[in-house]
Amino acid sequence: MDCVLKLASQRAVVIFSKSTCCMCHAIKRLFYEQGVSPMVYELDELINGREIERALVRLGCSGPTLPAVFVGGKLVGSSKNVLTLHIDGSLKKMLKDAGALWL
């Protein structure tokens, strides 16, 4: 779990993903289209990917565990949480506060 928190705090936006997951792709695209360059960890391509995924569950990722999005080192959640924040406009403020957006 400490490993996940350390990775999540290294950039303003960190996404734990799987390269074959369509919702992971959609969430990554959402951030890229807003001008954010997230650090993306593709768990299916990492040796310790399953261990990281189990740690994400222990941190509170529920439902579909992936994508797991961290902004400013804090867990935002999965695609449902991110899309809800995007629709109500609060995601942009979070990104600005974390230093991921300049405008």
Image: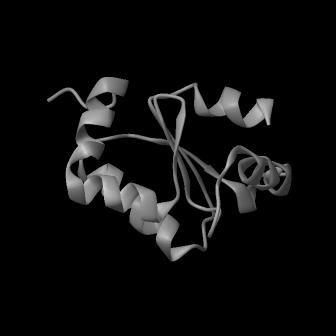
Residue at x 32% of width, y 51% of height: 32
In the rendered image, the quadrant that contains the N terminus is top right
Q: Is residue 67 visible?
A: yes
31 w.r.t. 5: above or below:
below
Left or right relative to 11: residue 3? right
Q: How is the image coloured?
A: one colour
In the rendered image, the quadrant that contains the C terminus is top left
Residue at x 38% of width, y 40% of height: 37
Direction left: furthest residue: 103
26 w.r.t. 45: above or below:
below
Left or right relative to 100: residue 80? right
Q: Position of residue 36 (x, y in %)?
A: 32, 41
37 w.r.t. 60: above or below:
above
Q: Position of residue 59 (x, y in %)?
A: 71, 44
Q: Quadrant of residue 17?
A: bottom right
Q: Position of residue 41 (x, y in %)?
A: 62, 48
Residue at x 68% of width, y 31% of height: 5
Q: Is residue 28 visible?
A: no
> How many discs appear?
0
Of residues 57 and 25, the one drawn nearer to the viewer in this rendering: 57
Residue at x 79% of width, y 54% of height: 49
Left or right relative to 102: residue 57? right
Of residues 25 and 8, the one drawn nearer to the viewer in this rendering: 8
